[in-house]
Image (cartoon, helix red, strand yellow):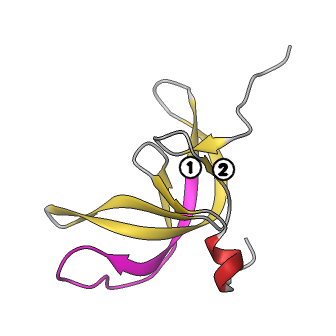
Amino acid sequence: MSSSVRKIVSDFAGNDLAVGDLVVSGSRVGNRVRLSEYIIAAISMETAPRTRRILPVLEVIPNGVESGFVKRASHRRDVIGTEHVRLVEPGYAQRHGVDLGGK
């Protein structure tokens, strides 16, 4: 029995995503939402608990560029889904020498 698992992960516009790409996504701060830029550090798949569907998940590092007046308190890695992610610049980490922390 063969299982069909997508090998390519894409943003909501259909652009392929890869480790090292620069993406933008919404992030919640208190009762507000801001746009934040992230660099993709890892791509994995998770199974949704209720629907049992396989969903792509991105481990990302914020690069400090974001909307809003209040600066981000920490630049820790975060895990986000791909449904609200948009590709900004493919291969960003490689071109700008960003260390992804060995992941």
Is residue 17 magenta-colored? no
User: Relative to residue 82, is residue 68 depicted above or below?
Assistant: below
The quadrant in which residue 56 appears is top right
Q: Magenta span covers which residues?
A: 58-77
The residue lying at 57 percent from left, 45 percent from top is 15
Q: Which type of secondary structure does the marked residue at label 2 adopt?
A: strand
* Residue 102, image x, y percentages: 75, 77
Distance (Cα) linking label 2 and label 1: 5 Å
The residue type indicated by label 2 comes to Ser
In terms of depth relative to the viewer, which is nearer, 16 or 58?
16
What residue occupies the far top of the structure in this picture?
1
Residue 44, label in figure: 2
Q: What residue is drawn where x is 70% and y is 33%? A: 6
Residue at image coords 25%, 73%: 67
Residue 100 visible, this angle: no
Image location (x, y in percent) of residue 89:
55, 65
Q: Which residue is mark 1?
A: 57
Circle 1 crowding by C-alpha within 10 Å: few under 14, some 14–19, many from 20: some
Contact between marks 2 and 1 (CB within 8 A): the answer is yes
Residue lying farthest to the left in this orientation: 31
63 falls in the magenta region: yes
Please indicate whether residue 2 sits to the left or right of residue 94 in the image.
right
